[in-house]
Amino acid sequence: MNHLHNNIRILVKAALVAALVFVATRFLSVSYGNGYVHLGDALAYLGAGLLPLPWAMAAAGVGAALSDLTGGFAVYAPATLIIKALVLLFFTSRPMRILCTRNALALVWASAATVGGYFAADMIITRNLGVAVVDIWGNIVQAVCSTALFVLLAVLCDRAGLKKIINK
């Protein structure tokens, strides 16, 4: 029974992260050209510091893809589902701090995966190198803003002892 209880707790936390990623991606965003810059990635990174990796990857992918589906970018939803999951590959939830060395280094991978992933998606979806190249700038801005916001949120959450509180 304890194992079932733990799985339900993780599922509820993952659903909450997915919902937060969705809201922050869909409604806390600024449109540009072929896409938009949003706060959802920073919350996905935060989720990766709080949840076991497969759960965090699923939550980030689902939350962001739902934003694409409801925000006029449905054609990008499958790519977003994959990209957002891959972006979290090197994060960890193991240490007691969200902003640990590994998660700080994972931000480099996350930024590269965001820019590279959406460049590839633009090439597949639009079949237009010009569009893909123009969108690189927005994806770089997205990656930089997400990194900065995650660091700020992680420091605040670590100071508040969030991991200890939610793991009771």
Image: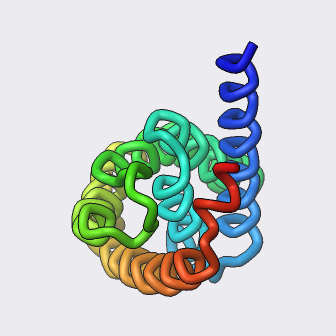
Q: Is residue 89 visible?
A: yes
Q: Quick one: which residue is furthest to the top in this view?
A: 1
98 relative position to 24: left or right: left
Q: Residue at x 65, y 18 (%)?
A: 3
Q: Residue at x 35, y 67 (%)?
A: 131
90 or 121: which is nearer to us?
90
6 relative position to 98: left or right: right
Q: Position of residue 117 (x, y in %)?
A: 31, 53
Q: Position of residue 101 (x, y in %)?
A: 25, 69
Q: Residue at x 35, y 44 (%)?
A: 86
Q: Position of residue 25 (x, y in %)?
A: 65, 66
In the displayed structure, 41 sits above or below 28; it is above
Q: Quadrant of the N terminus?
A: top right
138 relative position to 59: left or right: left
75 or 16: which is nearer to us?
16
In the displayed structure, 10 sits above or below 115; it is above
Among the 4 quarters of the image, the one containing residue 20: bottom right
38 or 149: which is nearer to us?
149
